[in-house]
Amino acid sequence: MSTPCWIDVAVQTPAHSQVGGLLSYRCPFLVQPGQLVRVPFGPREVLGVVWAIQDHAPADMPASNVRDVLGVLEGLPPLDEAWRQLVQFSAQYYQRSLGEVALSALPPQLRDLSNEQLARRLKKQNTERAVNTTPGPALSDEQSAVLAQMATGTGPFLLFGSTGSGKTEVYLQAVERMLAADPRDQALLMVPEINLTPQLEERVQARFGNDAVVSMHSGMTPAQRLKGWLAAHAGHARIVLGTRMAIFASMPHLKLIVVDEEHDPSYKQQEGARYSARDLAVYRGRLHKAPVLLASATPSLESWHHSRPADAEDTGGRYQRLLMPSRIGTALLPKVRRVDMNKQPRRAVLSTQLVAAIQERVQRGEQCMLLLNRRGYAPVLHCADCGWKSECKHCSAFRVFHKIDRTLRCHHCGLTERVPRACPECGNADIAPIGRGTEQLEEHLGELLAHVLRTDGSPVRIARIDADTTRLKGALESQLAQVHSGEVDVLIGTQMIAKGHDFRRITLVAAVNPDTALFSSDFRAPERLFALLMQAAGRAGRDATQSATSEMWVQTFHPQHALFEALKQHDYPAFAASELAERTAADLPPISHQALLRADARTQEAAQALLNAARETLEAQLSENPDTADLVLQVSVYPAVPMSMQRVADVERAQMLLESPSRMALQKMLWHLHGVLHQVRSQPEHKGVIRWLVDVDPQAI
């Protein structure tokens, strides 16, 4: 046993508790920063990460009060300094406790393992993970040019390439070159959603061999997550493929980070520490001196703005923009056709022209895809006599009618009830659905195409893919396999089907009702809609032999809208320029920086009262101090308002927006706000508040 030392340890503490920093312990063992230790925390024994080693007891605490470390998790190399810096930055920037971020980044099973159990798992590890690279296809001139630019630049890089231009092959080539340069180097490939992972995983494993690749996403079992994490941490896994959680994977030899579909909102965590994995990827690349490649056909306006070229009045952005405007080979982008729904019969779901076009494609043996971003049969059930609607009694939302199982289901709190036989208010038996969901569209299209036959003489096959049809494990994979094999003629679904899938047989894509996002109160809604439609259009004509006749149909009541004009030309730069001009005029991100403070309470008054009290206290305290008085001028703090979805599961929600042209000033304000919130929350008049949280760089307001 060595001489005792004192160590600072990060442990998982309750969110927003006063115990938010590092805790001090006396350690009778020899340890290093980054090692995992078991320590007493209250009556429990918990796992912690050694953050720093001190040569004396904490000055503000008698040595007799410092508790002893209970043990060290043996056999694991320490978490390196770059990983600890990433965690520390994330905790500070996103306003969470250091221990919360550090421990949630580790596989849950690691917390419960004894040294003997861990030793058994480490013994089973495949330490010889050979990379067996299979040569990829010949590169196009554009792909070769982009790789040459990456080889001479330092990044971060924004790869802006049209759908079907071969972006995936570019980063597989980049990974191949990196792996060949050094036998220890590791690459991190990130995708926005789990349902895109198996497709890419298959392709990466076929290219580099099964042994070299591990996956990380929330759909894995705890044992799978632990096995993958250990392989990456030890350096045996050369490629980690995962969703946003993979940004915190311990990869000591990380030399390349790729963020595929970087525009996708799924990279922003919406619970706990609300981090953006895309933004952390850029920060982590700097820590490891590793190039970062952000790739998308519809980049986020933030990344587009950061990659702007320099001119006489502007020094330009800090990213380097790489361009791949052409599809691979002779494949063409689909022709965009707009249908003016004002000229269609009233209440028409599908225009006669679109139905005829679908029929023609099916009879030719081609596939079609219809996009409607609303699941269920109908958003609302309604009584025409008394005006009753199927509201959720726990949320400020309507319960959606699902015809398949005759239920009314709230998509926010999960409340599910059988459809009433008559109106609960007046007893009228004639209650009817209002609006349309994917379920109703599937039924309606089945009726319209009932007389149409496939090339083999069999009836048309329609499939629906949304959150309802993919609940069971393996359901999504089997449904996608049916589409790829040609068993399905018409695919109907929500945004899940528009992202990243390589459907080779689809030649017609149609957006059934995209207008709702055009006039949303959320300033990001047009950006998300344009990305969704461009990505959906990209599913058509990916096979060069059919691309000349591929089409994207848009049914709209606003055919002359600028967004649809840009879509028709496949002109993302024009759309981005007009959106950025509007954002600049209104001082909205990426020109300014925002944070949301949210409060949940039993009443809306209590939620707003906490936020407004924090605002008044904060501004009063800052104004009194000459060192901080400037912050009040630099950061706008708006009064509290109800959230757009005001009540969920009987909890009332309010929010307060903070906005500043300076990211540094906003961070300073949030640091001061943290202390004020603890102070205000402890006052008796705010007992009705359940929780509060800070969302830095929010994706929705």
Image (spheres, grey):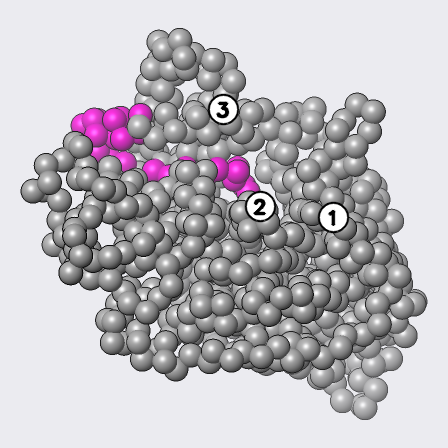
Cβ–Cβ below 8 Å for labels 3 and 1?
Answer: no
Image location of residue 629, percent across then percent down: 43, 12
Dot 3: element: helix
Residue under label 2, please give it. Answer: 286
From the viewer's perspective, is 79 left or right of 560?
Answer: left
Residue sitting nearer the eye, 484 or 276? 276
In the orientation shown, which residue stands out farthest toward the left? Answer: 64
Cβ–Cβ below 8 Å for labels 1 and 2?
Answer: no
Which amino acid is tagged 1? Gly
Mark-to-mark CA distance, 3 and 1: 31 Å
Dot 2: element: helix
> Which span is picked out in magenta?
676-701
In the orientation shown, which residue stands out farthest toward the front? Answer: 2
Residue under label 3, please give it. Answer: 665
Image location of residue 538, percent across then percent down: 77, 61
Residue under label 1, please give it. Answer: 153
